[in-house]
Amino acid sequence: MTRRRKPRFDLSRESINRLVDLHPPWEDVELEVVHEEREVRVHVAHDGNERLSCPECGCRCSGYDHRERRWRHLDTMEYRTYLVCDVPQVRCPEHGVMTVRVPWSESMSRFTNRFEAMVIDWLREANVLAVRRLLGVSWNAIYGIKARAVVRGLSRREDCKPVHVCVDETSFRKRHDYVTVVSDFTTGTVHFVGEGRRKGTLNGWYRGLSEEQLGAIESVSMDMWPAYINATLKHVPGAGDKIAFDRFHVMKKMNEAVDKVRRVEHKSLFKEGRNDLKGTKYDWLTNHANMPEGQRRRFRQLRNSSLKTSRAWAIKELGMSLWKYVHRGWARVNNQIKIYQNKCSKVHHFRPKKGGMPFHRFQSPLFDFGRPLLLGGGGGTSDLLVLTWSGSICGASSMRWF
């Protein structure tokens, strides 16, 4: 019985050229392994018979000098791998002395394209600190790789055609430093990132759109920040029927209104010597479906009483039930929207303050349930960014690195 020979690991020049993705006129001339520094150095050279050209204008130029540079490549068996090359320089009549561009890396980068692609993949799974520690690169190097990836992505992106838009803010440093993020709910594409969360920030993005693009917007999902509302009302045609408040912020406002009713009524009852509402704050704010059985039995008596707080809680529950409808028309058929608006207008703490904007007046945006993004699409933009660039946002030292 003959013994099968194990395949031999071939490190010929042709194999190295394939592994490093080298093509003429660039070729490998030497493979150096430095065990003391745990490095593999692939020395690359340019074919001297090939004519050189200016990297700016492309005109044929004579050679001027060489400059040694090195780029970090994908590791080889836990050894850091570097491409080392004496890059030719040319003298251009128009641009002067210029360094020839290499095909395996971008200008001003010290990493190969394959290494940068691996860093981007890692950043989608871990934060900057973890990637920096695992790959042994600096903060500035990682942020530079991210910046170049963004430029490449923007160059490949087609013309912006927003239909369902999500607007949200997120903090990129400690304290209260915010950026405004505009994204497309359908594709997940980020259309705009602007500094601050003022009206002028969102106005800048709207002004960059044509009238046709603004008219094509069917919905804008956002929280209840007045600056975003006013900017959208100013630029988007028919924005009163297109603004969509996400469920989280709507229910937060409604819970605050219920708690205000409870506090006022508790003071009134306490003066009469009654403690009906004492210690019941979280009974009114807790989702009924999440209540323990004992708490649910106690709360059943409260909600069936004739207290004003009980009526306010019923309005909140009615508002929450509207999200169960798939289409606005179904809610209208059952008169749920009309009932909800009438109840809100009759309770003092569900009305807006002077000059405020009542969210229950936005009929179309609040109850157009045929669109999934209206169930909280805008409020999830910051969560999406944190998941995608975990740690990158909070660790950004300035708007430049965000």
Image (cartoon, rainbow, N blue to C red):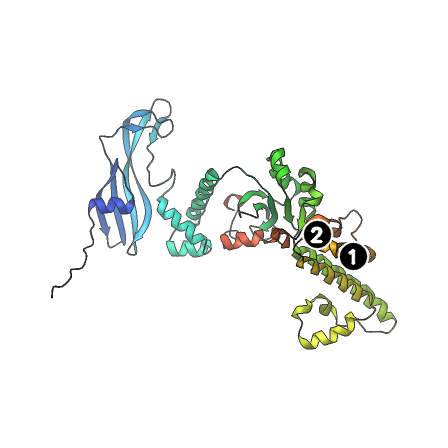
Upstream in sequence: badge 1 or badge 2: 2
Give residue 21's quadrant in the image. Answer: top left
Q: Where, quadrant-wise, is the N terminus in this rendering?
A: bottom left
Q: Residue furthest top?
A: 93
Q: Residue 97 location, x and y as percent? A: 34, 28
Give residue 91's quadrant in the image. Answer: top left
Decide: few, some or many residues near mark 2? Use Cα within 10 Å; few <14, some 14-19, many ≥20: some
Q: Secondary structure at mark 1?
A: helix
Q: Is residue 391 visible?
A: no
Q: Amino acid at mark 1?
A: Ile
Give residue 269's quadrant in the image. Answer: bottom right
User: Where is 288 relative to 366, above or below?
Assistant: below
Q: Is residue 390 left or right of residue 80?
A: right
User: Which label sits in the foreground, 1 or 2?
Assistant: 2
Q: Is residue 338 left or right of residue 76?
A: right
Q: Which residue: 37% across, 22% down?
A: 94
Q: Secondary structure at mark 2?
A: helix
Are the residues at dot 1 and dot 2 in contact (C-beta closer than 8 Å)?
Answer: no
Residue at mark 2: 329
187, 260: nearer the viewer: 187
Residue at mark 1: 339
